[in-house]
Image (spheres, grey):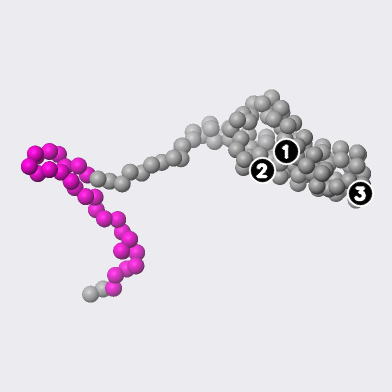
């Protein structure tokens, strides 16, 4: 006798046939239902999503760079301000600016999820801090 393969005990059992022999009805085969929640996208949809992703990244990078330059002009080194207050101001202003910019460039903001907003705000903060730091040096 051979030793049972550990994977073999998890194999699917063959489909069970149920039916009534007395009535002579057609046998039904029970199979596990596969529910697919993933929507298949067409190549045009994939291309549009890719293009929109690039546009979102570019807009966020430009807004972050502009915010860095503006903060350097207004606050200089920022020693007299709380750094977290400046970050919150940048996050708040750029969030509302993006809500007005994206519909004008045909990007639907209703499709944005938390992950998308978090992504663009992270890009903005990243470019903001890098720009401000480079200008300070």
Front-most of residues 89 and 37: 89
Residue picked out by circle 2: 119
Residue sitting at the far top:
104
Magenta stretch?
A: 3-29
Give the class, few, some or many, for how many residues have Cα within 10 Å of label 2's Cα (few <14, many ≥20): some
Q: For residue 34, say whether it is visible.
A: yes
Picture mark count: 3
Residue located at (24% from left, 53% from top): 14
Residue located at (83% from left, 43% from top): 86
Residue picked out by circle 1: 60
User: What is the C-alpha distance between the residues marked 1 and 3?
Assistant: 26 Å
Q: Quadrant of the N terminus?
A: bottom left
Horizontally, residue 106 falls left or right of residue 60, namely left
Q: Secondary structure at mark 3?
A: loop
**16 is within the stretch colored magenta:** yes
Residue sitting at the far bottom:
1
Q: Secondary structure at mark 2?
A: helix
**Pointers 3 and 2 in contact (CB under 8 A)?**
no
Q: Secondary structure at mark 1?
A: helix
**Pointers 2 and 1 in contact (CB under 8 A)?**
yes
First in sequence, mark 1 or 3: give its number. Answer: 1
Up the image or down, 2 lies above or below 23; here it is below
Residue picked out by circle 3: 79
Residue located at (36% from left, 44% from top): 34
Give the class, few, some or many, for how many residues have Cα within 10 Å of label 3's Cα (few <14, many ≥20): few
């Amino acid at each position: 006798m051979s030793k049972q393969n550990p994977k073999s005990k998890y194999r699917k059992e063959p489909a069970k046939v149920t039916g009534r022999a007395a009535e002579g009805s057609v046998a039904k085969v029970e199979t596990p239902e596969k529910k697919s929640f993933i929507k298949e996208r067409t190549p045009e949809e994939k291309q549009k999503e890719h293009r929109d992703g690039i546009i979102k990244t570019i807009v966020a990078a430009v807004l972050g760079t502009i915010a860095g330059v503006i903060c350097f002009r207004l606050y200089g080194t920022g020693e007299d301000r709380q750094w977290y207050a400046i970050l919150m101001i940048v996050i708040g202003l750029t969030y509302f600016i993006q809500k007005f910019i994206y519909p004008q460039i045909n990007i639907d903001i209703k499709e944005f999820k938390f992950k998308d907003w978090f992504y663009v705000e992270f890009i903005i903060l990243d470019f903001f801090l890098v720009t401000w730091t480079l200008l300070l040096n």
